[in-house]
Amino acid sequence: MMRQPLALAGVGVVGIGIGFLLSGGLGGSGEAPGADFPMAIQQAWFPPVSDYDTGGGPLDDERFDGLMSALDEALTAKETLADFEREADIHLWSLTRRLAVPEVSQAQLERIQSYLDDLVARHPEHSEMIEYRRTFLPSYATSRPSVPGLTFDLQLFGDADSYPNRGEPFTDGQGDRLLGTLDAIINLPEIAADFEEEAASTFWRFGGRLQRGQVSEDQGARISAYFDRLTEEHPGAADFLARQRFLVENLTPGMVAPNIVGTDTEGVEFALEDYRGKVVALIFSGQWCGPCRGEYPYQRAMLDIFDEDEVALLGVNSDARLETIQQAKEDEGLDYRTWWDGHSQPDAETVAAEGPIATEWGVRGWPTIYVIDDKGVIRFVNKRGGALIDAVDQLLSDQRMREYQERTGTTVSPNRPVRALIVPAQPAQPVSEEGKQDGNGNRPD
């Protein structure tokens, strides 16, 4: 069973910038949105992450001893013992991520394993959590190019019940909580100490939450004003924040989708804007990705169901070899146009998930699917399987009703669905994180 990220939402700690929200936040309610964050991330328990950036070189015993001492102090602190499952989980993650860049010796790894054995003996009721964290050690103890962010494996923005159902509008209260939680997270000590490196995964998850629902014009303006303030506070991170701002302001439901211009699998250039007037399902996919392949039956069904409608399926492919996607399209009956985005990574063997289109659209999970209406506006993000078919059908229904009302001058609410849709029965598929091939990655909640 895949363990889910630890959920940490509630009320309590508020970032230093919340005054902005109180004076003119999304809802203007005057109540400070915040988050009930564990003590494990409210204060600095470990030496700075930068102390363990050896450039891939060995981790000397002095720094290793300091890390283990900090871990033991953190795990025996009264704050940790008060809620061991939640607090210790984060402390063990803090240890693991500091092992990502340096080369950890076998003796050091054995010492960590021995410490974890003792930890299980002392806290047998929390053995599942400890053993889960132990599984990270083999891969993280071999040198990686960078340190994963503090929030990479933590769910800090609350559970799905705190936000609208996909495609529905955000309430002002939901917007308050979301933006307030973002502000609180980026002011946590470890994130503030290395803003760009540490905040990247936080902004990604923030954007993922925004993609759940529709942001109003006023809410969008408040978010933009918040980014203005962040840029003033972090002038050295202006380029980084501009990138995060682009993703939030352009790839959220209710925004006009950025144009895509590229070459298809037959070598012909075309653009997303060429399909204005049609409902578009834009599918970021790859033959290397198991969850992506799990969507193929639904895509074939859509080609049949919407054969006579103004609907287009468009793909962005991340396979490293052009022949791979060409053969897959033939074998799987995927008769829709696809940009090959793998051309920019000639040295990649199988996965080319960092192509220019995927990078521009901030794609980190595969598949990623956008549903775009006939005006070019993003309406849904990451509808999959039968839900994707229903979303496209809903937009067609809305479009037909709008045309009817314009033609007759009447106002009628459509009843959905407008047709009985029979789709192939397929189990829901997981999402593959960028670069992973096992299909077990997580989305931005």
Image (tube, helix red, strand yellow):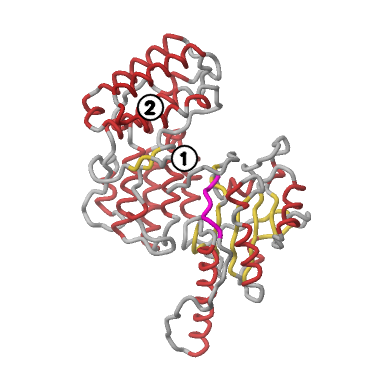
Q: Position of residue 372 (x, y in %)?
A: 55, 64
Q: Was residue 281 drawn as part of the magenta stretch in this picture? A: no
Which residue is rendered at x = 66% and y = 73% of the image? Answer: 307
* Res. 182 image quadrant: top left
Position of the N terminus, as image quadrant, is top left
Report the residue at 61% width, 68% height from top. Answer: 276
Q: Residue 238 location in percent, x, y?
A: 47, 40
Q: Range of the magenta residues?
A: 426-432
Q: Mark 2 sits on what residue?
A: 92
Say few, some or many: other residues with alpha carbon within 10 Å of mark 1 (under 14 / 14 to 19 / 20 or more).
Answer: some
Amino acid carrying mark 1 in the image:
Ala
**Amino acid of disc 2:** Leu
Q: Is residue 55 above or below residue 271?
A: above
Q: Element type at marker 1?
A: helix
Identity of the residue furthest to the bottom in this view: 408
Sequence-earlier tag: 1 or 2? 2
The numbered dot on residue 60 is: none
Q: Secondary structure at mark 2?
A: helix
Whether residue 42 sits left or right of residue 55 in the image: it is: left
Where residue 27 sits: x, y (%)?
Answer: 28, 58
Q: Position of residue 44 (x, y in %)?
A: 32, 26
Q: Determine whether 57 is above or below 425 in the image.
A: above
Answer with the quarter of the image where residue 37 lies: top left
Image-based side of 71 in relation to 325, left or right: left
The secondary structure making up most of the magenta span is loop
Measured in 3D between alpha carbons, the distance from the residue under mark 1 to the one under mark 2, in whole angstroms, is 32 Å
Q: Which residue is mark 1?
A: 238
